[in-house]
Amino acid sequence: MSAHWTLAKRAHKMNPSVIREILKVTEKPGIISFAGGLPSPRTFPVQAFASACDAVLKTDGAAALQYAASEGLPALREWIAGQLPWDVSPDQVLITTGSQQGLDLVAKVLIDEGSTVLVETPTYLGALQAFTPMEPKIVSVDSDDEGIDVADLAKKAPGARFLYVLPNFQNPTGRTMSEARRQALVDAAQAAGLPVIEDNPYGDLWFDQPPPKPLTARNPEGCIYLGSFSKVLAPGLRLGYVVAPKAIMPKLLQAKQAADLHSPTFNQRMVAEVLKDGFIDRHVPTIRALYKHQCEVMLDALKKDMAGLDVQWNSPVGGMFLWARLPEGVDAVDLLPKAVDKGVAFVPGAAFYADQGDPRTMRLSFVTASEEQIRIGIQALADAIREAVKG
Amino acid sequence: MSAHWTLAKRAHKMNPSVIREILKVTEKPGIISFAGGLPSPRTFPVQAFASACDAVLKTDGAAALQYAASEGLPALREWIAGQLPWDVSPDQVLITTGSQQGLDLVAKVLIDEGSTVLVETPTYLGALQAFTPMEPKIVSVDSDDEGIDVADLAKKAPGARFLYVLPNFQNPTGRTMSEARRQALVDAAQAAGLPVIEDNPYGDLWFDQPPPKPLTARNPEGCIYLGSFSKVLAPGLRLGYVVAPKAIMPKLLQAKQAADLHSPTFNQRMVAEVLKDGFIDRHVPTIRALYKHQCEVMLDALKKDMAGLDVQWNSPVGGMFLWARLPEGVDAVDLLPKAVDKGVAFVPGAAFYADQGDPRTMRLSFVTASEEQIRIGIQALADAIREAVKG
């Protein structure tokens, strides 16, 4: 008899990401991609990492290559606690294998089968993927250009396990919550006793001024905060962190230990070494300047090339993405293969909705492609849209 | 109103590891520890890693620091597939963040609440921790000095989701399954249609001759195989792998993507670089020789110092651990603080049983402590046992 493999119920709910499959097509050489969420490799501090590797292996190679505590490297936890704009003890900081793992741990610790989890409309696809295996009922809260609609939140909050929200330069829309909206959201969540999971991978990537302070800074006992080194140093090291109320931390830690024992010791030491002496304060402004410029180039190109087409887009004040809406009757999923034929790729917005999405939306990344590629790519995209409109 | 945090049901089942708490005590400076499962740092190829870091950052720094595919680095998957002693396609290899993550992914994909999962008696604690959050019913199969009792397995197999087994130099016991036992186990599993999860982190650490071929080599469609670079290169990089039947791989991959997107690109490239030119074939024999010698030192010390005490132990033919049994009436959990007072630590065997364990058992690692520490530590342990026997 051959082995009788029985998949868990949750495995049937994990779908092959449609996007992932679509995007495979876009990885053909020569395609200009606005699709991926890849930071610009020009921003990776390769030389700083090379020096850090050298220093770490020379001074303490054996410890850097050994097993280590599940909580993470004390020096790194202290650095993180110290730079957050509210009172955080290093004991509340858990180092994770990318902030994606933070979402996995939160899901394991807070979601039962059938639990209601509230998300923005649209929301980060990776969060939907992390939550789904724990079989929640995911409910979209109405959202506008500033994110969560607080009145709709108040209506949907009763009984929900938590709200997941990405207030700064959101993935996928690039939108940012205003000061007033943040406070209103925190007040509404507090009134309802609703825990908030705040994801902030892009917060440092502001163009002209920092975004308003995090939700967690306003109510640390009511929030879990997720951060990442992927966008300010490099994603290939897979280092992120969770900041949680002291009462929740032991369970997150147990889940972390069961998931991968600990995040790579070597990577943690390398990053701690790079962070010494204020490196990040010199480095991050260069990323901000680059991304701001690239965003401007894309906005200019859109203005020029989409003229006469009924295409709308927003103007992000930071981050990596902007959000566009196609003319009536043009579906982004249908448009994608045509755009790829013309040499340009994007992600159809439908991928980012927990329920039925707006088929006319798309996410455009302005950070991975070069300035010249952005100009050529937007022109190609406009051509594809023009043909689609003609039908 | 303060936030109303509701923990998932599974979170209540995740226990603070008693062992972990006990072992914190043993981390006091000056304690000789036979407790941890830490490879000897003397075996870490620090210089090879330093050269690899340098090469990787110089030749392809940007790619090494960027996001990458969830499956893992093609060159690494090919290397792994190529060195396994059965016909494996690189498509069947998934790179994981340590082999602990392989256990987490297997649990997510194959365990429903209440599913029966079969394990050895005793079994690897980390597997129990990885399976528990998915809320299985964990059932111990009777085991002897060679591992799984095949008759008991046949009795317990019907309806079970899988058997988890660690055939080589098992953690915690150090025992190894014979050729005959392996074949009998595979035959029994096939007869029952029972999938097998084979964990093989220690298989390369044989002393005099390689262990019999893996269970998976005998029935690849009926097994998932977990491997690791932690014991042959270094654990601090957190790189392991899962080899699965093609039908199961898509679900493991989806679970992997949701868990941490991918394992660190940089670490994968570093290891692929180190593995070039047959490095591992020169390196691993030095680990084998060291561990064999350290095991002999511990066995000699046990023979000398435990004379006259009714203590029993096995003689592993590879790996990192041996298994000892205390005199009647001496409980290893009670003994531990007394041993620590005398300057030596171990792990009480009870930690490794899915159900009621044998309180007289203990796990002793012979690889982390030095030769001199092993002699001193075993003497101290004998003193502690002598006093406990006198009561």
Image: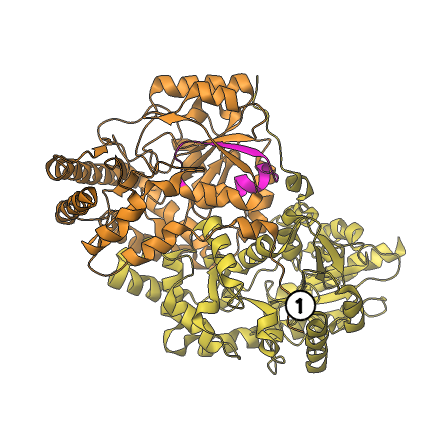
Chain colours: A orange, B yellow
Split into 4 quadrants, where in the image is the N terminus of chain B?
Answer: top right
Judge whether B366 appears above or below A138 on screen: below
Q: Mark 1 falls within which chain?
A: B
Rendered location of residue A202, percent (x, y)? 33, 37
Q: Nearer the viewer, residue B18 or A236?
A: A236
Judge whether A177 appears above or below A68 on screen: above
Looking at the rendered structure, the secondary structure element under dot 1 is: loop
Q: Is residue B47 in view?
A: no
Q: In the image, which residues are magenta?
A: A104-124
Residue B94 shown in magenta: no
Q: Is residue A251 left or right of residue A274?
A: right
**Residue occupying image coordinates x 85% and y 56%:** B330
Looking at this view, name the residue that lies furthest to the front.
Answer: A391
Rendered location of residue A322, percent (x, y)? 26, 36
Q: Is residue A202 left or right of residue B388?
A: left
Q: Is residue A18 left or right of residue B11?
A: left
* Residue where numbered disc 1 is placed: B170
Label 1 Cα crowd, 10 Å radius (few <14 / some 14-19 / many 20+): many
**Residue occupying image coordinates x 45% and y 55%:** A64
Q: Nearer the viewer, residue B286 or A35?
A: A35
Q: Is residue B76 in view?
A: yes
**Residue occupying image coordinates x 36% and y 53%:** A236
Rendered location of residue A66, percent (x, y)? 50, 57
Residue kind at label 1, given as amino acid type: Gln
Q: Is residue B54 left or right of residue B141?
A: left
Judge whether B250 appears above or below A309 on screen: below
Q: Nearer the viewer, residue B197 or A124?
A: A124
Instruction: Tell how many labels.
Output: 1
